[in-house]
Amino acid sequence: MRLNQNPYPKKRITTALLLAAGTGSRLFPLTQKSPKCLTLVNETSILERLIKSLNQHGFKRLVVVTGHLEDCIRNFLESRAGNIKIEYVFSPLYKTTNNIYSLWMARKIINEPFVLIESDLVFDPSLLTDMLYPDRIAIARMEPWLNGSTVTINPSNTIDAFHSDAKNNSEQTRYKTVNIYSLSVSSWYQVIEKLNLYVLAGRVNDYYEAVFRQMVAEKTLSLQAVFFDHKPWYEIDTIEDLESAEKLFPARISKTIPVYGVKPDLSGDTELNAREPFVKEGLYA
């Protein structure tokens, strides 16, 4: 059995950083008049699901890096933040930069441990529990149809290396990054130093994983793995992703219990819309 608990108790994190500056072009036309994080997943937006999760876990502060249609995000959160203080950082170059630049934009406003979350993720709220302590990374077992950054881990469940794609020519097990991280103050300051170098060199179209990959290789960043395999999560980049996510996060409780790797039979389920695309990412991929 894999344990995620840290044997050395630390103070729980109560600050979150949400990167929500991108245009979400692959979700067009849904993102033409609404930012990606306000995309509805069975009538509840990605951002509303996140805010509920953060409130449930006692978060006190949320910093949002905005760009595309930032007024929509501000208007939405004005009455929905609950007990969380919301602060904003606007990224003026959001159309021509990637998330490494968005993370760099937050360097002056955050000076405490925090959880970093992407704005295209939906996940079961309980999955955040083990991410509330510094220097952790959310991962899930790799499947053939997944793509993007992967990691390998050592016997102590800390990250051994980042890999830029899903290809695996070794015998080591690869895990998919879920794009949720927690960082201590000391780790964050070291990340900022590296971000400064990347931005100064003009590498503003990289993903921030490039920084994490280099730091892990240099052994200046250590991240403990938190496994997201036991509950549903999904990364929504395209319309097809959205359709699949709605299978995992129905508007109401479904009579059908999803099984990992098995296409759900929706023929007798009146509470889910009967869309055909098979869930290809997240827990029930």
Image (cartoon, grey):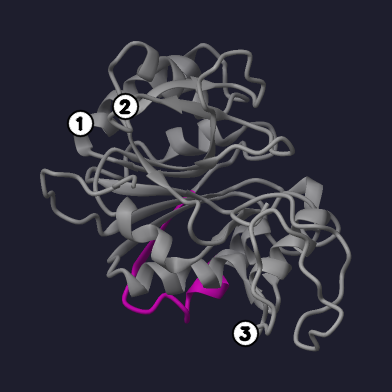
Precedes in sequence: disc 3 or disc 2? 2
Q: Residue at x 42, y 60 (%)?
A: 127
Q: Amino acid at mark 2?
A: Pro
- Residue under label 2: 155
Badge 1 amino acid? Ser
- Count of labels in the image: 3
If you read the primary sequence from the N terminus, does the residue marked by circle 3 or circle 1 appear first? 1
Label 3 – label 2 distance at C-alpha? 38 Å
Q: Percent position (x, y) of residue 271?
A: 75, 87
Q: Position of residue 67 (x, y in %)?
A: 60, 49
| Between 15 and 76, the one nearer to me in the picture | 15
Q: Which mark is residue 186?
A: 1
Toward which corner of the image does residue 122 lie, by quadrant? bottom right
Image disc number at residue 255: none
- Which residue matches tag 3? 253
Question: Marks 3 and 1: CB-CB under 8 Å?
Answer: no
Magenta-drawn segment: 74-89
- Is disc 2 placed on a helix, strand or loop? loop
Helix, strand or loop for disc 3:
loop
Amino acid bearing label 3: Ile
Q: Is residue 214 above or below residue 70?
A: above
Q: Around disc 2, counting alpha carbons within 10 Å, would you say few (fewer than 14), some (14 to 19), or many (20 or more)?
A: few
> Relative to residue 273, is residue 71 drawn left or right?
left
Residue that appears at 25% across and 43% down: 134
Q: CA separation, marks 2 and 1?
A: 24 Å
Image location (x, y in percent) of residue 145: 74, 38
Q: Residue at x 79, y 84 (%)?
A: 269
Residue 71 position within the rendered picture, expressed as x and y whole percent measured from the top left: 60, 64
